[in-house]
Amino acid sequence: MGIIVIGIDLAKHIFAVHGVNENGHAELVKTKVSRDQLLPLIANLPPCLIGMEACSGAHYWARQFRQYGHTIKLMAPKFVTPYHMSGKRGKNDAQDAAAICEAVTRPKMRFVPIKEEHQQIILCLHRTRQGFVAERTATYNRLRGLISEFGIVLPQKVTGLRQGIGKHLDELPGYTRQCIDDLLTHADALDARITDYDKVIAQAAREDARSKRLMQRPGIGPITASALLASIGNGHDFKNGRQVAAWIGLTPGQHSSGGKARLGHITKAGDNYLRSLLVMGARSVLNSIGDKQDYFSCWARNLVTRRGYWRAVVAIAAKNARVSWAVLKYGEDFRLNKSEA
């Protein structure tokens, strides 16, 4: 009886593989498979279902295994945890592989879309840029904290901080001024790096027809369009736009009981980066709405009046997420009603 399902516990150097037949009996149990032995092992097996946790390197291995006719399913690690049968015996790689093998066969299991190489290239640009932005914020916070030790308190905004720091440099004692100068120079270098990455991402977005269609939506610029395209792809892994909004964390959490629906704050699940981009885009829409009389502007203005600013921001961000899914899935066949455009 042949192997039909395989669970692989991924690692950097040593992997664990657990394969079962159609009766659920273990046919292949390898607790220590080196990195150079994993691909030949899988390549020599007949096409089967392979489950892995969506962790570092999972998308790479999924693309490699897919070349040999296997069906690959990636799962979030938190969805695999309930299938661990270790109990008091502890946790090890072999038990992890067995739990993955069991979890991948569950009919209601939720899977992670496999990213293609070009998607990961674009996401690499975004993650690097995101790291530079976080480092720049940390640099300014460090600078603000250091000068406050000498009685100098400046505005929170970077522009106010940069304008005000020059007036107080002479008041800083000893080597403190050198520290502040170095931090300002480092922040300037980070600004230049971020600007360079903005240009590269914008250029990549302009060269892709799908990104250009996304950028036609209010509140979606080159950065957001590029990140959505790299994360969602063609949108075929989602049944509808609401699933995308829920995946990004823009839908309200439910606390319903006794037949009464209770909706709370948004879940903030999924990709923080995508959610922050969509929210910032929604804020820019409201800030620039002015007295525009088109359908979308009137809808957003009325939404602010009825539900408040922040609920309107979330609603616009969720709407953009849903429409983006439709644009990516249906391409040029997707058209909004003229009254909603």
Image (cartoon, helix red, strand yellow):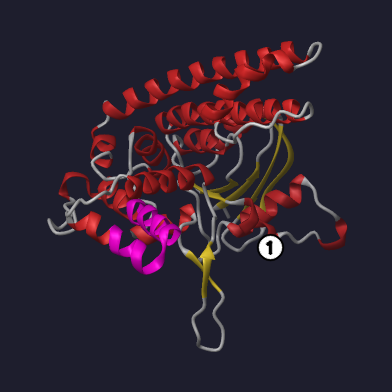
Q: Quadrant of residue 179?
A: top right
The residue under label 1 is 82
From the top left corner, tell me how far across and down residue 320 is, in percent.
33, 51
Q: Is residue 308 magenta?
A: yes
Q: Is residue 156 magenta?
A: no
Residue with the most extreme bottom position:
258
Q: Which residues are magenta?
A: 300-321
Residue 47 seen from this side: no
Q: Report the magenta stretch's main SS.
A: helix
Front-lying residue, 237 or 212: 212
Residue name at image x 54 percent, y 61 percent: 267
Amino acid beneath label 1: Pro
Where residue 176 sits in the image (x, y, percent)? 77, 15
Q: Which quadrant of the rendered structure holds the N terminus?
A: bottom right
- Could you say where residue 315 lies in the image, as x and y percent from the top left? 38, 59
Above or below, 105 relative to 172: below
